[in-house]
Amino acid sequence: MNELKPMLFRSLKGYTKKQFINDLISGIIVAIIALPLSIALALASGVGPEEGLYTAIVAGFLISFFGGSTVQIAGPTAAFATIVAGIVATNGMEGLVLATIMAGVILILMGIFKLGSLIKYIPYTITTGFTAGIAVTILIGQLKDFFGLTYPAGVSPIETVEKVEVFVENFSTVNPWAVAVGVLALAILILWPMLPKVGKIPGSLIAVLVGIGVVKIFDLPVNTIGDLYTVSGSLPSFHMPAISYDLARAVLPDAFTIAVLAAIESLLSCVVADGMTNSKHSSNAELVAQGIGNLGSALFGGIPATGAIARTAANIKNGGRTPIAGMVHAVVLLLILLLLMPYASLIPMPVIAAILFVVAYNMCQWRPFVNLIKTAPRSDIFVLVLTFVLTVVFDLVVAIGVGIVLACVLFMKRMGDETEVRGWQYVEPETDDTADLRPVPLGVRIYEISGPLFFGATDRIGQISVKSFTRCLVLRMRSVPAIDATAMNALISLYERCQKQGITLVFSHVNEQPMAAMEKAGFVDMVGRENFLPHIDEALEYASKIAE
């Protein structure tokens, strides 16, 4: 259980006043960065602005306290926006809370059963594909607010394709003032970080302040958060959802998606942080912390949370080196919630859209996407593009499910293609070309098997053929690393065929895993232990005696 021990307790050994000051400053800076992002991501998720802060406060504090990384900053992230919006639209807030609680339990179990290392088996093409797809859905979801469109009463599209259709149909209602405010905010977000000295102040905060000032001073007809949502500055309160079997069954796929996505994103963030700090995280402790954080967030009015790569990187760059920085970030956000939250109602919606445009751009990974298109094998490109399209057209649940299944099938096909069963060729003796070849009696047939023998390659065993004069069949298996039950059954069928034809089946150089599988299946005793030889020379000598 030592690997589930939070990094906080390890970090406090030898903790100094200087490090506390660095953590304090970093925590405050990261909180300022997280403030507009948390509000924007909450709105993109179809919930109120305060839910974003509740998530960053509760989940952010708990994940830092229990986490397996010394520098991880957690909170709402763009990856969850479309999932959360879909759950809220379909099953309401009660469904979202229950799905997040179930996801939290799944994450805790993943950590307890040490499944952190399994995340590496999710292909890079899938993570790149669905990340780019999420970025596109976020961008499309913000077009309405950026252009200040007005939709007819009762029109509230949920699916991405529907949002595009409704956007096009109602583009004639564009608000030039909203576009102007959005473009101004976008320009600040892009150009502000390039300025010397002041560029260290988060551009999103400057964009929010300038946007509020422009709309208020010039009294522009632009929607603000307060026009569309009721903003509350109250403390998050405990809420246990009404749990029913039907609701739990309905949100179970979403819960698994939240859990898997939280695990992927948080552990990827940990890996990035390890590279920046030359440290090492505990993946299973981090999964448990993610589970606890999501449980706390759901029970106190928040939405799903995970490690945020951008905020974690900002924490590191500003001197944060222990979980204290993440806890300070949560406390500062709590103070902002209590003291300044009413002013959030003044933030123009085009500014929120501009912030999310930049978030979508930063997370889309278009350079790795294009590079994969140029350099990856065709099967990987197919998985990448299909995952991307399914994420945009349908949802992440479908995309991840289909992507993983397809990637596994294509991988198995690739492995099956690598498996080869090749018969030794008979040549005329006593020629110069045969000086290094082994003599093989006419009644002996030899096949060399290369690659894993599994259900995708069992047809290769069926290709083994013998002659009417064959008395002994030798299978050389030095290049077979593994065998499964389907291939084992094919070998049994081959043995039975040899028995009917009076042919002795001999094996040469069977590796550890295939030998263990054969032992367990009783195949070794069936064939006869004397027919298993450690080397091809011994197998040939033994087969020659049988063929005499």
Image: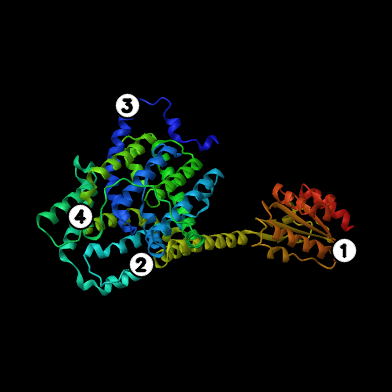
Answer yes or no: do the residues labelled 1 and 2 have beta carbons within 8 Å? no
| Apparent side of residue 106 relative to residue 451 in the rendered image (left or right) | left
The three-letter amino acid code for the residue at tag 1 is: Gly
> Relative to 176, does residue 288 appear above or below in the rendering?
above
Q: Quadrant of residue 497?
A: bottom right
Q: Residue at x 19, y 39 (%)?
A: 197
Q: Is residue 100 visible?
A: yes
Answer yes or no: do the residues labelled 4 and 2 have beta carbons within 8 Å? no
Residue under numbered circle 1? 502
Position in image of residue 408 (x %, y %):
55, 60
Which mark's residue is nearer the viewer, 1 or 2?
A: 2
Residue under numbered circle 4? 185
Query: Local crowd at mark 1 within 10 Å, few (<14), some, or many (≥20)?
Result: few
Q: Secondary structure at mark 4?
A: helix
Q: Secondary structure at mark 1?
A: loop
**Mark 4 to mark 2 CA distance (whole Å):** 26 Å
The three-letter amino acid code for the residue at tag 2 is: Ile
Residue under numbered circle 3? 18
